[in-house]
Image: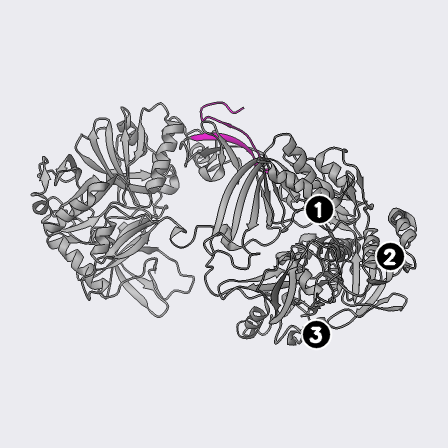
């Protein structure tokens, strides 16, 4: 079980959290103005990176807030966690 | 005293005699004995039959590495535990043990014919046979294989014991209370750290428990052990956990411990937990798990009476047991010299010490330290160098051993040692990197791990002095102990013929592994699976390195090139009870009951599970069938009034100055302009344009909405709303609160609904139009009253605080409404063509597919999923659309999921046009009805299609999904 540091609540066991997919995928500000390829890329294309991966978690059974984490997908080590609108470290 | 018990010595309590039985025979042992040591003390070596060949097997080891001596322990019919290692069972007064895997008895086992027929069962034989003829698989092969599979028999009754679970945090968790682990615990405890020290054995001390000659700081080793344990016990910051196996290492330094609390007791208190599962997260994990001795691979190395040299020493020194009278020691490692020496001192004849090394060269050089010492003391000890073993004899106990030159030596005990394999299981599970160490002939922890430290023999640091120093990170111990070196061998002895076992538990021989390589297997992972070496409960503790050595030889590669198979948890088996803990029966999954549950129970409702909710399916009168009850309930709603517990609906309160704007962005509907006191049927899409959920959105005030969701979608919808609010539109000032549990919902539906409610309602004008809401009181209870309908009738949803739901229910019931359940609710909504999100909308349907385009706010710039609706695939012709189906025979009820085709005579696979999503018998319409998602469905009105079944094709006609009151006249009544 991973030990995840919620930026608001501190380190808590994984079972308090839900995974929420890759981070920093912003919804286009005006969806009507992007073409089909850009929109479907926003919907479906993800980096699936091996190694350092920026991803979203939600402290569902704690403060219920979303935040971002950088996790090494090969070792599961969580290198950093940060608030949604903060820049990645 | 038993015949094979030494006159003195050992850590057993000779004042406490315990009676126990094995296969119905009564024996005696002492407090402190294991089942294995007690049986050996009684001269019993035949303990088991092997898995595949049913060969007689005895005790190979003295601990968790025992592959052969597996038994069943029986307390009663429900408490029988199969496949336990006799070497790890503490005996208690009255213990009942039985051997396994034989018929009719352990001594005479018909299954042993497999041993004679063994040429028929080479590695992978089950991949090569049982193929032809095809019919024989189900009738012959599978029943035979099922009967032969496994060893012990599982109990047939539910486990009556209880199990506990616990989380713990500490600075240092030390696994293994041998010299290195104890030294590590003492050193870290001294620094003020919180320490947990666990050990799988009943007594802590590891190798010190059978150490009789060494001294530490001038004290005999066992005195040092007692003093150290006493000091640790008194330290309040140290927790000692004996009988506790660290069975697995998990990410972020979480370690699973299985603590056995009552298995060693004669009469455990059934209200106390039998085991406790610990999940420990230490800052630092110190592994002091020691090393396991490797067997030598020579023909007939598996007979009862053949055991590891270190195990024989343990039985002698720790349990005071003489494992035989006349021993032959076969070794590729110096440590066995010490065993020979100590056995001789105890009065056992050592007929010969066969050192398979030839005494010269690199390996020979490492022998000298131990050797010189032995030769000094070993008057007349016959040492034979450079020999091989050709065979052993004896049916149920070894009686002789034959050397490569033909010399036969009579004996009743053979000790063997191929060297020691460091136990790197947990280090590897913690994703530590391993490296092959040629000196140790084993894999050792390689690169340092940030949170895991290996100390002592598991790190390749052998010998008492070195282990203590390694554990404590200091050299302050003054130790006098016999040397213990590296070295040893991997693989099979030269010139091995006959059955030379590598994996005793799975009956894998050296030949099997060589055969696998000959048949083309190269990866050690494939060789493992093909031969089954290193599998099952043993996980190759004694076998893996020898298997690797043989494979490496056959492949002409170095062991490090071949590599190791993955170490998987658990290290030794853990009971299901431990993992389940209290999550059993009613506590397995939470059961959610509505505030009106007791009313439904009192009415005699039949319940169904809807997710975690228990909902009333129908409420039968005496003697009524489900069909009859549902028809009556529907009739009541259509002709008078029914009442329904809708409390499971998800309810979200959306509050804030931007609440309208937020909901406008979330839902397809135009909600910002929704007037206060009005409701709207809301549709929520996923961003990919497909319908996710639906519900009623009511505006209580300019900045306050009451949003309902489907029962199953409540948490999902709130999570999705929070996601957008927190991450995309954090500029909006909105607060979301789940109020599902706070509001109970009583739906009152039917032409008489208004008359029934009128006398009860206070300060609300019931002339309220359809899709409106008002706040007021009902029977003096505050209510949010919605005029909405999921039945097509005039209807109200009475929301009241959960605590007052019962009295309001009773008041409405007293006015004459008929309670109805979820089945009638489904029939009524299907008659009106109302969808269930998740059933008729299955995650691949757009609003247009479902005929719901009317709900979309046409002038809205954006909402979740809007952009996707313009994607070519979602706007294309030929999509599946919601339609109604009427079967030719009104009595035929289609099955949900039934495929629909235009020509039932076409060849399979047929071209499928769609499938049935909802199907019921409608009492109102006097016939069956169905809804379906059908390709170009709306263009197919009145077409005649078919539902092909196994025995016939059911004719259906495509119609509108609204079967009843298509103009909606009743709704507005």
Q: Residue at x 81, y 44 (%)?
A: B481
* Residue under disc 3 on the same chain as residue under disc 2: yes
- Which residue is disc 3 drawn over? B117
Looking at the image, residue B93 lies above or below residue B839: below
Q: In this view, does B40 lie to the left or right of B162?
A: right
Q: Mark 2 lies on which chain?
A: B
- Percent x, y of residue B305: 75, 65
Say which element carries label 1.
loop
CA separation in Å, label 1 and label 3 = 39 Å
As drawn, A26 above or below B173: above
Residue B139 lies within the magenta run: no
- Residue B355's label in the rendered image is 2
Left or right: where B592 falls relative to B774: right
Q: Position of residue B493 (x, y in %)?
A: 82, 59
Q: Choose mark 3 or mark 2, whichever is in front.
A: 2
- Of badges 1 and 3, nearer the viewer stands 1
Disc 3 secondary structure class: loop
Is any atom of residue B439 visible in this view? yes
Q: What stretch is highlighted in magenta?
A: A66-89
Q: Position of residue B270 (x, y in %)?
A: 47, 56
Residue B907, picture quadrant: bottom left
- Of the 4 image quadrants, the one containing the C terminus of chain B is top left
Instruction: Identify the chain of the residue marked 1, using the numbered disc in the image.
Output: B
Q: Residues within 10 Å of mark 1 (few under 14, many from 20)?
A: many
Label 2 neighbour load within 10 Å: few <14, some 14-19, many 20+: many
Image color mode: one colour
Mark 3 vs mark 2: which is more N-terminal? 3
Does residue B937 show up? no
Query: Considering depth in this image, is B282 or B542 the residue closer to the camera?
Result: B282
Identify the disc placed on residue B290. Answer: 1
């Amino acid at each position: 079980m991973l030990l995840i540091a919620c930026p608001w609540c501190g380190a808590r066991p994984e079972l308090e959290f839900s995974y929420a997919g890759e981070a920093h995928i912003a919804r286009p500000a005006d969806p009507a103005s992007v073409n089909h390829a850009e929109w479907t890329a926003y919907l479906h294309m993800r980096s699936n990176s091996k190694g350092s991966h920026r991803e979203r978690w939600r402290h569902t059974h704690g403060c219920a807030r979303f935040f971002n984490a950088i996790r090494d997908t090969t070792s599961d080590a969580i290198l950093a966690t940060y608030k949604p609108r903060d820049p990645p470290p | 005293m038993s015949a094979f018990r030494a006159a003195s010595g050992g850590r057993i309590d000779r004042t406490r005699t315990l009676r126990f039985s094995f296969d119905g025979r009564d024996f005696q042992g002492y407090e402190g004995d294991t089942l294995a040591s007690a049986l050996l003390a009684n001269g019993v070596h035949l303990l088991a039959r092997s898995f595949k060949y049913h060969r007689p097997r005895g005790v190979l080891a003295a601990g968790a590495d025992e592959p052969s001596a597996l038994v069943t322990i029986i307390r009663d019919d429900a408490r029988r535990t199969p496949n336990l290692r006799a070497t790890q069972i503490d005996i208690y007064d009255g213990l009942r043990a039985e051997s396994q895997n034989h018929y009719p008895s352990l001594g005479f086992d018909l299954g042993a014919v497999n041993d004679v027929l063994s040429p028929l069962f080479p590695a992978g034989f089950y991949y090569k046979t049982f193929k032809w003829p095809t019919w024989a698989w189900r009738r012959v092969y599978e029943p035979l294989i099922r009967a032969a599979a496994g060893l012990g028999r599982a109990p047939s009754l539910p486990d009556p014991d209880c199990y506990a679970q616990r989380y713990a945090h500490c600075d240092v968790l030390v696994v293994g209370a041998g010299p290195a682990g104890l030294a590590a615990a003492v050193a870290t405890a001294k620094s003020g750290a919180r320490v947990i020290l666990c050990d799988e054995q009943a007594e802590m001390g590891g190798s010190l428990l059978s150490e009789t000659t060494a001294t530490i700081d001038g004290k005999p080793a066992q005195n040092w052990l007692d003093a150290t344990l006493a000091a640790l016990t008194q330290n309040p910051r140290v927790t000692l956990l004996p009988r506790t196996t660290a069975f697995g290492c998990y990410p972020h330094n979480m370690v699973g411990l299985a603590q056995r609390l009552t298995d060693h007791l004669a009469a455990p208190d059934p209200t106390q937990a039998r085991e406790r599962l610990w999940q420990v997260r230490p800052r630092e994990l110190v592994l002091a798990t020691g090393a396991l001795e490797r067997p030598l691979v020579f023909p007939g190395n598996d007979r009862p009476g053949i055991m590891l040299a270190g195990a024989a020493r343990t039985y002698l020194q720790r349990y005071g047991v003489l494992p035989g009278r006349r021993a032959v020691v076969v070794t590729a490692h110096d440590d066995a010299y010490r065993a020979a020496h100590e056995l001789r001192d105890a009065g056992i004849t050592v007929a010969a010490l066969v050192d398979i090394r030839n005494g010269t060269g690199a390996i020979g050089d490492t022998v000298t330290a131990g050797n010189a010492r032995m030769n000094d003391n070993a008057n007349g000890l016959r040492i034979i160098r450079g020999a091989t073993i050709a065979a052993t004899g004896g049916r149920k106990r070894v009686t002789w051993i034959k050397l490569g030159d033909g010399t036969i030596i009579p004996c009743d005990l053979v000790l063997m040692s191929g060297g020691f394999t460091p136990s790197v299981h947990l280090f590897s599970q913690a994703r530590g990197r391993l490296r092959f160490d040629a000196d140790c002939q084993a894999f050792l922890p390689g690169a340092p791990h940030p949170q895991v430290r290996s100390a002592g023999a598991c790190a390749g640091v052998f010998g008492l002095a070195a282990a203590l120093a390694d554990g404590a990170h200091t050299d302050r111990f003054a130790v006098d102990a016999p040397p213990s070196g590296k070295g040893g061998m991997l693989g099979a002895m030269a010139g091995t013929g006959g059955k030379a076992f590598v994996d005793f538990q799975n009956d894998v021989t050296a030949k099997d592994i060589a055969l696998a390589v000959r048949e083309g297997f190269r990866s050690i992972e494939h060789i493992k699976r093909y031969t089954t070496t290193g599998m099952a409960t043993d996980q190759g503790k004694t076998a893996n390195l020898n298997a690797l050595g043989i494979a490496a030889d056959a492949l002409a590669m170095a062991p490090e090139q071949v590599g190791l198979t993955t170490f998987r948890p658990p290290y030794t088996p853990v009971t299901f009870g431990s993992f389940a803990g209290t999550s059993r029966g009613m506590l397995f999954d939470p059961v959610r009951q509505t505030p009106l549950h007791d009313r439904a129970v009192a009415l005699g409702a039949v319940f169904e599970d809807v997710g975690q909710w228990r909902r009333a399916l129908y409420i039968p009168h005496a003697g009524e069938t489900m069909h009859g009850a549902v028809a009556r309930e529907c009739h009541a709603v259509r002709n008078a009034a029914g009442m329904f517990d809708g409390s499971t609906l998800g309810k979200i309160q959306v509050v804030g100055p931007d609440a309208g704007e937020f909901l406008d962005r979330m839902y397809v509907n135009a909600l910002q302009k929704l007037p206060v006191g009005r409701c709207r049927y809301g549709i929520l899409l996923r961003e990919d344009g497909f319908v996710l959920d639906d519900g009623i959105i009511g505006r209580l005030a300019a900045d306050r909405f009451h949003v309902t969701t489907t029962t199953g979608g409540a948490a999902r919808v709130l999570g999705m709303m929070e996601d957008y609010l927190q991450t995309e539109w954090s500029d909006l000032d909105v607060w979301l609160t789940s109020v599902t549990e706070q509001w109970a919902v009583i739906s009152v539906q039917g032409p008489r609904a208004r008359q029934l409610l009128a006398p009860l309602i206070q300060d609300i004008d019931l002339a309220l139009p359809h899709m409106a809401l008002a706040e007021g009181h009902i029977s003096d209870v505050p209510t949010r009253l919605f005029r909405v309908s999921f039945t097509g009738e005039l209807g109200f949803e009475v929301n009241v605080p959960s605590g007052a739901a019962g009295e309001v229910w009773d008041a409405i019931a007293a006015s004459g409404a008929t309670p109805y359940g979820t089945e009638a609710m489904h029939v009524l909504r299907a008659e009106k063509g109302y969808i269930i999100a998740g059933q008729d909308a299955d995650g691949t349907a757009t609003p247009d597919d479902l005929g719901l385009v009317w709900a979309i706010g046409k002038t809205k710039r954006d909402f979740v999923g809007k952009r996707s609706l313009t994607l070519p695939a979602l706007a294309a012709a030929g999509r599946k659309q919601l339609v109604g189906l009427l079967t030719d025979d009104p009595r035929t009820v289609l099955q949900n999921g039934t495929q629909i085709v235009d020509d039932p005579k076409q060849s399979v696979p047929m071209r499928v046009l769609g499938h049935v999503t909802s199907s019921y018998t409608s009492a109102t319409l006097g016939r069956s009805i169905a809804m379906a998602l059908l390709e170009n469905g709306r263009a197919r009105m009145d077409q005649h299609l078919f539902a092909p079944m196994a025995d016939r094709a059911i004719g259906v006609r495509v119609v509108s999904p609204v079967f009843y009151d298509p103009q909606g006249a009743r709704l507005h009544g």
